[in-house]
Every structure is written in C-alpha cells, then in structure tokens.
Image (cartoon, grey):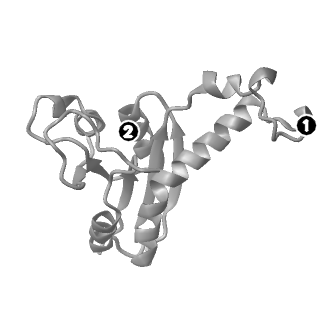
C-alpha cells in the first residue's frame, strides 16, 4: 500500500473508533498520521489571573506565578489533550503512531489548512458537527476546509445531532 499522510482535526466531537478504523485501512509502511486541535486562548482571562485581588488563598507565594505566555501554553496543552487523547488512544489500539499538534487560533478552518500544509497532509479527517445538507453547513469549519484547502476531506459523523446549528455539548 502506498504511503499516505493523514491529518485528523478534532475538537472532541470526532468519534475516535471510526476515525482510527478508517486510518488503519489507508495507511501503509511509510504513512504518517497527525492529530490536531485548534484552541482559542482567552488571553484576557488568563492575564486577569495575575491580579492580586483574584489570587486564590491556596497559592503558596506570589513569586511562583506563571507568565501570561506560560499560562497560555498550559491552557493550550490541557484543552488540546482533552480533544486529541481519545483519537490517539484509538489509533494506538490499531498500532498507529501519531504526531500531535495543538494550534492556537481564532479561525479553526485556517488553522487546519495551515497545519495540513505544514505536515504535508494528503487527506484531512474531521468530525461532522452539523447536518451536511443545510445552508448553515456551508458556513461550517469543515465546509470551509473543503472549499479552501484543495485536499480531500473525510467527514465522520458523530452521534445523532438534532437539526440545529449548534455543536453537540461535549463533557470535558
């Protein structure tokens, strides 16, 4: 089987088992799989954590506080892990190794396209969070990735989604 480079983009709604199963059917010896998520970091909130008024009484000492950038990196890592860990575990069950990318960004579609270029992806796998044949679906992140990336995009449907424009609630 020829080598293929796959980028799996998730926000936590992509069903891990079907995505991993699909990847296991596609990859060969020299193939690679990258898993990513895009996180918007609320910097003003993190910076507000430095205010003495809001400091927890559990803090040991003021000199142990992290910089805003360190807090942002920690936030990115923690939120990112919650989104990608189920996918990585499902891939590991199929003996597929993956690279992990946590990307900070305000525009998930652009971040996915940029990451796909950086890793040399030939296919993007994403979760479908809306019904595909509604007007709102064409404004979705997945539709924007399909239209702007020029890569094949596989949308894996999640659990049954009601006919709304809202994403399903994910317990974190």
Q: Which residue is mark 1?
A: 61
**Does residue 124 appear left or right of residue 99 in this picture?**
left
Density class for disc 2 (Cα within 10 Å; few <14, some 14-19, many ≥20) is many
Residue under the image location 81 percent in, 36 percent down: 57
How far is disc 2 from disc 1 in space, using C-alphas? 43 Å
Classify mark 1: helix, strand or loop.
loop
Residue under the image location 77 percent in, 34 percent down: 56
The answer to whether 105 is drawn above or below residue 162 in the figure is above
x and y, in percent, of residue 166 in the image: 26, 35
x and y, in percent, of residue 90 in the image: 40, 70
Along the line of sight, the residue nearer the viewer: 52 or 78 = 52
The answer to whether 61 is drawn above or below residue 139 in the figure is below
Quarter occupied by residue 59: top right
Residue under the image location 47 percent in, 50 percent down: 172
Residue under the image location 45 percent in, 46 percent down: 37
Asked if marks 2 and 1 touch (Cβ < 8 Å), the reply is no
Density class for disc 1 (Cα within 10 Å; few <14, some 14-19, many ≥20) is few
- Labels 2 and 1: the sequence-earlier one: 1
The answer to whether 43 is drawn above or below residue 26 in the figure is above
User: Which label was assigned to residue 70?
Assistant: none
The answer to whether 161 is drawn above or below residue 5 in the figure is above
* Numbered label tally: 2
Q: Quadrant of the N terminus?
A: bottom left
Along the line of sight, the residue nearer the viewer: 147 or 169 = 169
Classify mark 2: helix, strand or loop.
helix
x and y, in percent, of residue 19 in the image: 31, 63
x and y, in percent, of residue 110 in the image: 39, 32
User: Which label was assigned to residue 113?
Assistant: 2
**Does residue 51 appear left or right of residue 146 in this picture?**
right
Q: Residue placed farthest to the front in the image?
A: 57
């Amino acid at each position: 089987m020829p080598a293929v480079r796959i980028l799996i983009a998730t926000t936590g709604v992509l069903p891990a088992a079907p995505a991993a199963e699909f990847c296991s059917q596609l990859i060969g010896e020299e193939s690679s799989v990258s898993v990513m998520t895009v996180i918007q970091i609320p910097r003003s909130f993190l910076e507000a954590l430095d205010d003495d008024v809001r400091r927890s009484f559990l803090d040991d000492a003021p000199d142990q506080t992290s910089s805003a950038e360190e807090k942002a990196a920690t936030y990115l890592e923690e939120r990112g892990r919650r989104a990608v860990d189920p996918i990585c575990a499902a891939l590991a069950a199929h003996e597929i190794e993956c690279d992990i990318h946590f990307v900070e960004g305000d525009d998930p579609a652009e971040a996915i396209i940029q990451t796909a270029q950086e890793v040399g992806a030939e296919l993007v796998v994403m979760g479908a969070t809306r019904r595909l044949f509604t007007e709102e679906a064409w404004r979705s992140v997945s539709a924007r990735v399909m239209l702007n990336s020029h890569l094949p995009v596989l949308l894996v449907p999640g659990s049954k989604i009601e006919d709304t424009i809202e994403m399903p609630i994910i317990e974190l």
